[in-house]
Amino acid sequence: MNREPNNLSSYSASIKPESDFEHNLKWLMFFRVLFTILLLGSTIILQLNQTPSPLALPLLFLYGLIALILMLSFCYSMVFRRIKKKVPFAYTQISLDTFFVTMIIFVTGGFSSVFSLLYLVVIIYSSMFLFRKGSIIMAAFCSIQYGIMIDLEYYKFFKPFVIDEALAASNHDGSHVLYRIVITMAACFAVAFLSSLLSEQARKTKKELMAMEENVKRVEKMAAMGEMAAGLAHEIKNPLASLTGSIQMLREDIKYDPDHDKLMQIILREANRLSSLVSDFLLFAKPQAGKVEAIELAEALTEAVEFFEKDSKRIKHISINKYFIPDIWIGMDPAHLFQTFWNLLLNAAEAIKDQGVIDIRMCRSKNDTVEIRISDNGCGISKEIINSIFDPFFTTKPRGTGLGLSIVHSILKAYDSQLDVESEINRGTTFIVKFKTIEAPRH
C-alpha cells in the first residue's frame, strides 16, 4: 500500500491526546489563579494580624507577587490559542511556578516557612504534563532554587521576612541547615520519580484503552460490512459462473472467427479476474474456517520471510532484519498465518521506493500474548487516510484491489487476534499483530 507524506499519525491515537493536553493545561491556568487568590490572600490576612501597617514591606511584596502571577496568567490565556507548541509552553509556565513558590517561601519566612511543600505540588502536576523527564527537571529547579535561597539566608546575604528572628537560617547550626536542604531536595526527587511513575502508567493505560476502543469500533464496522459483502459476493459469483460457462460453450460450438475469438478471450479473462476479486471479497467477508494447529511462531515467521525473500522483484532493494524468540506457540491454521505475514510483508515492501529496511520483531506481552512488529522505513501513512486502510477496496496504489489488509484483519479477528498500525510520515510504518500464546505441544 502506498503512503502519502504528511505528519505523525497513529491509528490507535489520533489527535485526541493533544486536545486532552490542551484541555488540562487550561485547567492548570485556572487553578493557578484560584490558588494564588486563596493561598496568598489568606497569607496576607495572617500577616495583617501580625504587622502594624497594611503597607509593610512583606505585604507590599505579597501584593506585587499576586499581581505578577495574575498578570502572567492573563497573558497565558491571551496567547494560548496562538501558540502551536504547547509542550514548551507548559515547560515555561511550570518553570515560572517553581520561581513563584521560591518567592512565596522567601516572603513567608524563608528557612522557617512551611510553604516549601508547594514545591512538591508543582512537581506532581508537572509529571501530569511533562512526565518523567519534565518532573525531574522541575525537581532540579526546585532543589537549586531552595538550596541557593537557604544558603544566601544562612550566610546573611539577605534577610527574609521572618516574624521571629530566632527562626532564621543564620541562627541555626550549619548541619541543621544542610539537613533541611538535603531532605527537601530528596523529597523533590522522590516525589518526581513516584508521581512520574504513576503518570506514565496512567498514560500507558489510557493509550491501551483508546486502542481497544478503536479496535472494537473497527471490528463492529468490519462485521457489518462483512455481512453485506458476503451476500453481495454470492449474488455476483453465481451469475458470473453461468456467464463464464456459457461463453466457453459458445466458443466450442460456433465456427471459429479470429475477431469473435479475441472478444471471447477478453470476456473470459475479465470474468476470471472478477471471479478472483469476488473470491478475495468472500475471504474478507467470511474467512474459511481453517484447521487450527499448534504453530511455533519463530519457525513459521522464518519460513514466510525466506519465501518472501525469493521474490527478487520485490526484495532486490530491501534488507530484512529478523529478531525472533524461539519456543513461542500459537493456535492457528498455517495457511492463514502465512497469508497474514505475506500480505504484511508485501505491504511493507511496496511502501519502500528506494533502498530500505524491513524490521520484524517478536516480543512477549502481558496476558499471555505475543506481539509481532513489522516495520518499514517507507514514507508513512498520512493521518487523513490511516483510519481507512483496513476498509475493503481502499488503496492508494495504481494497481491492486485494496483487499489485502482487510483480509488480514478478518483472518486475525477469526482467531481472536488483533492488528494495529502506527505510522510517522517520512519515517515509516509499523504493523503490530497480537496473538494469544498456547502451551507447547507434548510429543
Image (cartoon, rainbow, N blue to C red):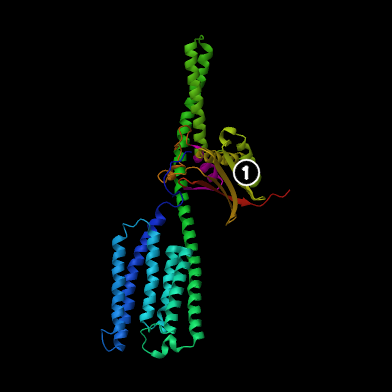
Could you classify mark 1 by the number of other residues whose Cα lies within 10 Å: few (under 14), some (14-19), or many (20 or more)?
many
Q: Quadrant of residue 46?
A: bottom left
In the current view of this chain or complex, which residue is farthest to the right?
Answer: 443
**Magenta residues, start to end:** 403-423
User: Is residue 329 at least partly visible in the picture?
Assistant: yes
Residue 245 position in % (x across, y down): 52, 20
Residue type beneath disc 1: Leu
Residue 234 position in % (x across, y down): 48, 32
In this view of the protein, which residue sits in the foreground, 374 or 47? Answer: 47
Residue 123 position in % (x across, y down): 44, 70
Label 1 belongs to which residue? 301
Q: Position of 337 compared to 24: left or right?
A: right
Task: Give yes or no for residue 405 being in the magenta stretch.
Answer: yes
User: Is residue 295 at least partly visible in the picture?
Assistant: no
| SS for callout 1 | helix
Residue 262 position in % (x across, y down): 49, 15
In this view of the protein, which residue sits in the foreground, 378 or 218? Answer: 378
